[in-house]
Image (spheres, rainbow, N blue to C red):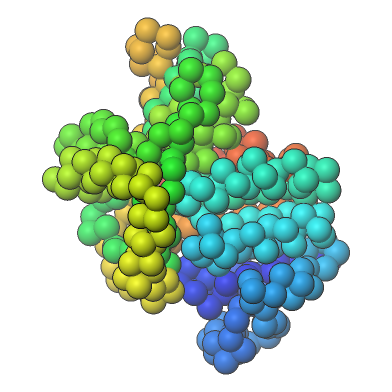
Amino acid sequence: MGRIVLFGATGYTGRLTAAALAERGAKPLLAGRSQGSLSSLADGLGGGFETAVADVGEPQAVRELLGSGDVMLSTVGPFTSWGDPAVQAAIDAGAPYIDSTGEPAFIRRVFERFGPPAAAAGAPLLTAMGYDWVPGNLAAALALTEAGDAATKVEIGYFLTGGGGGASGGTAASIAGVILEPGFAYRGGRLITEANGTRVRGYEVRGDNRPALSVSSSEHFSIPAQFPSVGDVEPFLGGFGSATRVMQAGSYAIAGLTRIPGAKSGLSQIIRRLAKGSTGGPSEGARASSGTHVVAIARDAADRPLAEVRLEGVNAYTFTAEILAWASITALAGGIEGVGALGPAQAFGIEGLQAGVADAGISRI
């Protein structure tokens, strides 16, 4: 039988995921750049875990991590910079691939560039299999199923509850990179270019009206593939409070700046200095005091609401680690349906995904 290869095991998300896998009785191969860090992680998990040193700068070393029947589980980010070798390794091996990215440009790359060769190789690719963007995929699929054939549009809102818990260094680096990349939207039955954060919408969350910014996500690819009659897919990301309108204005400004020759390169260098990547994340206590809330609303052609689904549960990082563990164990057991780039509800079925999401700590309310 194969094994789960956890690539990027010593980063913040990687460590949480390794612990979640161990709690479920799995023994992943822990892979990363530093043997010392890998050995320390393995010892902290109780021993008995194999380790392997591999760096994204040496793609062949990444490819050699995978054997017959293995699953590639990558938490190496920012993915737009470092994610390709793990995807290519999985395709070359014909192995299932799962990652924790939330980065729109990388998600698009997986679906458009890597998806076709992965399908030919018999490899399923499950990108964005963390809090970004699994619960929204589930909520949207449930709402559209309940709405029936009259539904032509779905909107999705992601929100944090409690203290929020803060962001990891890796997340900060990923977000910093995202603001310089062109975003996308799905309207009128086609994918179009649109900067992230250019639209604002309000949602009721626990009795309060909470603003949210438009965001590019995996739902733009997965929902139309599963529900072909849906012409508009609109995900929104909350959590910015009174800064929402300021961020919207900033999004327009940055979109304009990056069209100036040389400006994007200069901004990128500044961002790389400010957002240094894997520098830790929220403590266990901070994660325990915060949670998540996701809403999806299916609408008809006249914009009338047909069905609404709400999910609520644990902190985003806690959920990400648990759903990655669940998905990779399920993949190792042959529980993925389909090949090529897939959305989570396509890969596991709506009922199967709902069970997995609940197992990871987020349930329908």
Q: Is residue 127 left or right of residue 175?
A: right
Determine which quarter of the picture holds residue 56: bottom right
| 284 over 240 or under it: above or below | below
- Residue at the spot 57% in from the left edge and 65% down from the top edge: 82
Residue 275 in sight here:
no
163 and 37: which one is in front?
Answer: 37
Give how far across and how far down residue 104 sits, in percent: 48, 46
Give how far across and how far down residue 113 sits, in percent: 67, 45
| 94 over 61 or under it: above or below | above
Residue 302 in sight here:
yes
Q: Is residue 287 left or right of residue 363?
A: left
Residue projecting furthest to the bottom: 36
- Residue at the spot 35% in from the left edge and 11% down from the top edge: 304
User: Where is the C terminus found, in terms of image quarters?
Assistant: top left
| 200 over 363 or under it: above or below | above
- Residue at the spot 67% in from the left edge and 82% down from the top edge: 53
- Residue at the spot 36% in from the left edge and 47% down from the top edge: 260
Residue projecting furthest to the front: 261
| 125 over 22 or under it: above or below | above
Give how far across and how far down residue 62 sits, in percent: 72, 71
Determine which quarter of the picture holds residue 159: top left
Q: Is residue 226 left or right of residue 212?
A: right
User: Where is the N terminus found, in terms of image quarters?
Assistant: bottom right
